């Protein structure tokens, strides 16, 4: 696995990761936790069957730069209704990703992607996404959010 290190000294590089709703699939988040840790992120793994409120509380407590939601049992749309409102009401301002088998009988992933983008997610991944792709995307997304002056200071 190639390493895509984050810049030390940038804003919080903590990510909160968990499986939302009643989903109990743990393997995916374990693999993601290892990949993001190897890339230099500080990962808070909430485990399975995580409520929206638990995501929000952990993100706020750890000043998370990103919240990563996993769902493999096909009911993510129901589980994620109001998710971004929950984060916002808790005062969480973080990049949000969701991935997995997000819809039962998912035929057209672009349609599924559009559904979750409409729910407020910054990026949507299917269950076939390589962990390196997710790590690289988050690294890029967080760098883009770092103010130019801060990047210049870090690079010097």
Image (cartoon, rainbow, N blue to C red):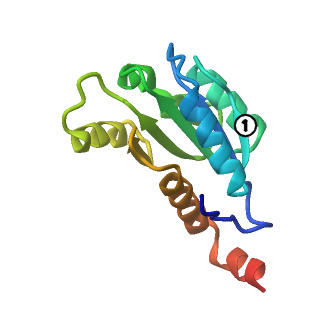
Position of residue 81 measured from the top left corner of the image (x, y, whole percent): 41, 24
Q: Is residue 30 left or right of residue 115?
A: right
Residue 135 position (above or below residue 69): below
Circle count: 1
Residue 62 visible here:
yes
Position of residue 142 measured from the top left corner of the image (x, y, whole percent): 59, 60
Indicate the quadrant containing the N terminus: top left, top right, bottom left or bottom right.
bottom right
Residue 18 position (above or below residue 6): above
Mark 1 Cα shell of 10 Å, populated few (<14), some (14-19), many (≥20): some
User: Residue 39 occupies which quadrant of the picture?
Assistant: bottom right
Give the residue at x 37% y 20%: 75
Indicate the quadrant containing the C terminus: top left, top right, bottom left or bottom right.
bottom right
Q: Residue furthest top?
A: 22
The residue wearing badge 1 is 44
Position of residue 5 measured from the top left corner of the image (x, y, whole percent): 68, 65
Position of residue 150 measured from the top left corner of the image (x, y, whole percent): 72, 74
Secondary-structure class at tag 1: strand
Q: Residue furthest left?
A: 107
Q: Between residues 149 and 132, which one lies in front from this camera angle?
A: 132
Q: Between residues 87 and 44, which one lies in front from this camera angle?
A: 44
Residue 92 visible here:
no
Q: Is residue 59 left or right of residue 9?
A: left
User: Residue 27 occupies which quadrant of the picture?
Assistant: top right
Q: Residue furthest bottom?
A: 156
Q: Is residue 56 left or right of residue 79?
A: right
Give the residue at x 70% y 53%: 38
Residue 77 position (above or below residue 154): above
Residue 105 position (above or below residue 62): above
Give the residue at x 77% y 40%: 62
């Amino acid at each position: 696995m190639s390493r895509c290190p984050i810049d030390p000294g940038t804003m919080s590089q903590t990510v909160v990761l968990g499986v939302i709703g009643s989903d109990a699939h743990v393997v995916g988040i374990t693999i993601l936790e290892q990949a993001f840790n190897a890339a230099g992120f500080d990962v808070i793994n909430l485990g399975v069957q995580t409520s929206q409120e638990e995501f929000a509380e952990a993100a706020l407590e750890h000043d998370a730069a990103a919240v990563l939601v996993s769902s493999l049992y096909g009911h993510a749309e129901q589980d994620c209704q109001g998710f971004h409102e929950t984060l916002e009401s808790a005062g969480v301002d973080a990049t949000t990703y969701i991935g997995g088998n997000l819809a039962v009988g998912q035929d057209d992933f672009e349609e599924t992607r559009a559904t979750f983008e409409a729910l407020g997610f910054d990026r949507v991944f299917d269950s076939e996404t390589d962990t390196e792709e997710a790590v690289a995307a988050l690294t890029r997304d967080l760098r883009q959010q770092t103010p130019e002056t801060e990047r210049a200071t870090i690079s010097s």
